[in-house]
Amino acid sequence: MFLNTHFPKAEKYWYMGKLLDWSEAGCHPMMHALHYGTSVFEGIRAYSTARGPAIFRLPEHVDRLLLSAGAAKMKSPYNKDEITDFIKLTVRENKLESCYIRPLLFFSYGNLGLVPKACPVELAISAWEWGAYLGENAARGINTFIVPWRRVHHTQFNMSAKLGGVYVQSTICGLEAREEGFDEAVFLNFEGRVAEGPGQNIYIVKDGTLVTNDRKESALEGITRTSLLEIARDLGFKTVVGPITKEDLFGADEAFFCGTASEVIPIISVTDGSDPAGPRKKNTVGEGLPGPIALRMVGAYKEAVTGRSPRYEKWLTYVNG
Ligand code: PMP
């Protein structure tokens, strides 16, 4: 029996053309993706707006799902328009106002060799109410830990794709940071510069300028990151896209994580655990409190996703529209 304890308000999930009860499962242990992480996925949010639930930047998310499928040499059984409709249907059928949406394409049941020659590619879409990713307290700022493991490098895999198997590193390092008593992990890249969080991009603020990195730094160029770049420029802030060194992060006036699940989360400290043999030093970011620009971005993002900024209506897909 699959309870929806950790998936509030989830009643049904979409699976290959059918809406199944949440507690109903049709997964066989020999499904290829379960063994080798041969799945690709998206993380999408819908927000309650004056015109009903609206999905934030849905076309961009579906494009990325299909890009990820291509990177994983998977042929999607559905095209962009079909997937878009199925996602809207899943939100509607669960009567969700605001939710997290998880489409998953995966090599299913067939053979178990590494090459999934007899495995069909299947699509499942789930949606449920998911509050603050790192908990409500995260709004007061989080303490982060630079893990000793370097982020998978962009020369090893297309890091713009969201491949299930690659997220093993995010899971392990997220656990590691929590074991050490921190709220979240930060990855450095092979070059020793800041890459990203396990499921978030990073921004720093220095002298009023917002700085974030890009794919050349082995970070996934997130949709939230790109939206915030536009919002920041519209607010009149100077923005720079380029490498962020560890020293830049330690000496920043402000820093924050961003991502679909995380939204915008101020970072108030960074402890350097990148050298397992070296000393660990806790670096307070700015005053050790969420900074004014980070808070401004939290607010502006919230307004954009909930349809309160006419300028960013272009990013919303109304579920009942
Ligand atoms: N980096 C990684 C590794 C992620 O998993 C995510 C979440 N998709 C992000 C960054 C942020 O991306 P987005 O804003 O598109 O959710």
Image (cartoon, rainbow, N blue to C red):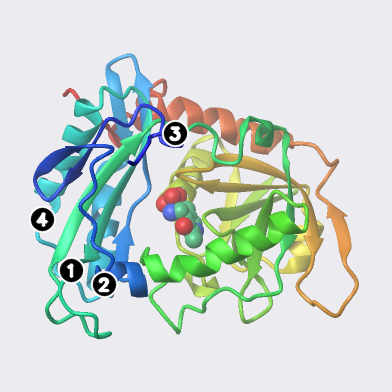
Residue 20 seen: yes
SS assignment at label 3: loop
Q: Quadrant of residue 91?
A: top left
Which label number is shown at residue 5? 3
Give the residue at x 62% y 52%: 203
Q: Earlier in the sequence, mark 1 or mark 2?
A: 2
Say above or below: 91 vs 185.
above
Residue 28 point in image, percent of width and height? 23, 62
Please state which amino acid type lies under the numbered disc 3: Thr
- The CA span between labels 3 and 2 is 27 Å
Q: Earlier in the sequence, mark 3 or mark 2?
A: 3
Q: Quadrant of the C terminus?
A: top left
SS assignment at label 2: helix
Residue 253 point in image, percent of width and height? 78, 47
- The CA span between labels 1 and 2 is 6 Å
* Cβ–Cβ under 8 Å for marks 3 and 1: no
Please state which amino acid type lies under the numbered disc 1: Tyr
Label 3 environment density (alpha carbons within 10 Å; few <14, some 14–19, many ≥20): few
Which label number is shown at residue 79? 4
Q: Quadrant of residue 241?
A: bottom right
Please state which amino acid type lies under the numbered disc 2: His
What residue did someone put label 1 on?
109
Please state which amino acid type lies under the numbered disc 4: Asn
Give the residue at x 68% y 32%: 137
